Amino acid sequence: MRGQFVRALRDLMHGRGFDPAGKVVVVTGGAGGIGSALADRLARAGASIAVVDRDAPRARAVVAGLPVRAGARHHAFVADLTDPAQVSEVADDVGSTYEVVDVLVNNAAMTSAERFATRSMASIEEELTVNLTSPLFVTRAVIPLLRRAPDPRIITTVSLAALMPQAETPVYCASKFGLRGAMMSIALDLAPGIAVSSVLPSATDTRMLRQEAIDGGNALQFQTPPQTPADVVDAVFSLLDRPRLEAYPKPREARLVRAATVFPNLLPALMVFFQGKGERGQREYLDDLLERGHVVRVDGRLELAP
């Protein structure tokens, strides 16, 4: 027991190092902004990438664009990860293709700008399943393949919404609060054999965030300009090099969020200040998206560019 504690402390302080060359990495939601950026960086470092996504054309396009280094093999696997049968099937397919998984990255997610009082029960269930249940399905299914690796890792994209309530997106918050707790618990359960970590980004400039901004979603997250997918990828690589329970692409912002939740009864008053600043930030973000051509006006409405 004492030896395990010393090893864990040493890994936390100094890291174990991680060389992607020759490794097999599974990235769920790999056709999205963060997933595709991570897949590209890992592929450039010599990893074989298994992109898992329910959007077949986008997943295959991501794989087609990945660089191949030192005999790496990239594949697209199409599955609806909310369906346990499809999760088991894609895990079997990954196992047949690679025989081992060195790193699993749970990255698939969704959100909705529809307010809670008007949402359907089905939409609530879908968001909870995509964001919370499906990462647990995938993690459970891939554990046997991870145990074949000499130094396996699991990294899950959670969110700062796992720490801070957000009035416009309570279902998203519920899913991320739950996912954070689940992954911390799984980390304790699988230690020391499999290193389990989570990355908690704030607003990130992806298609999902752009659509949310158009739809008038959570303004609270626009206190500062959104980070890029590359910023999140940097945090993921820091977890690969130095495994620990959590990492934050914007540490200062994470500290502010944690401080704000120390006294939860003050949150209604604090939200008044944060809300106004966030709404201004959201308008500035939409203006920037229009300027960059990521959003266009169609018949007076804002839409994502093709």
Image (cartoon, helix red, strand yellow):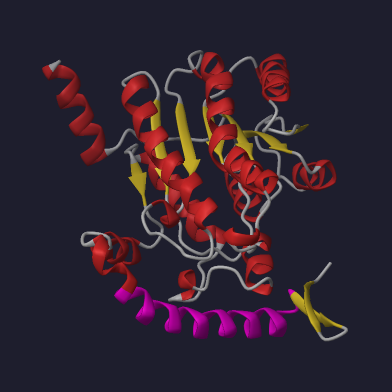
Residue 27 position, x and y percent, is 61, 37
Q: Kindly tell me whether residue 158 is visible in this rendering.
A: no
* Closer to us: 19 or 28: 28
- Residue in the image at 71% along x and 47% along y: 31
Up the image or down, 57 lies above or below 167; here it is above
* Closer to us: 232 or 275: 275
Q: Kindly tell me whether residue 275 is visible in this rendering.
A: yes
- Residue in the image at 77% along x and 43% along y: 59
- The quarter holding residue 72 reads top right
- Residue in the image at 62% along x and 64% along y: 209
Which image quarter holds the C terminus? bottom right
**Magenta-drawn stretch contains 286:** yes
Residue with the most extreme left position: 2
Magenta-colored span: 269-294
Residue 275 position, x and y percent, is 43, 78
Q: Is 239 positioned to the left or the right of 48 in the image? A: left
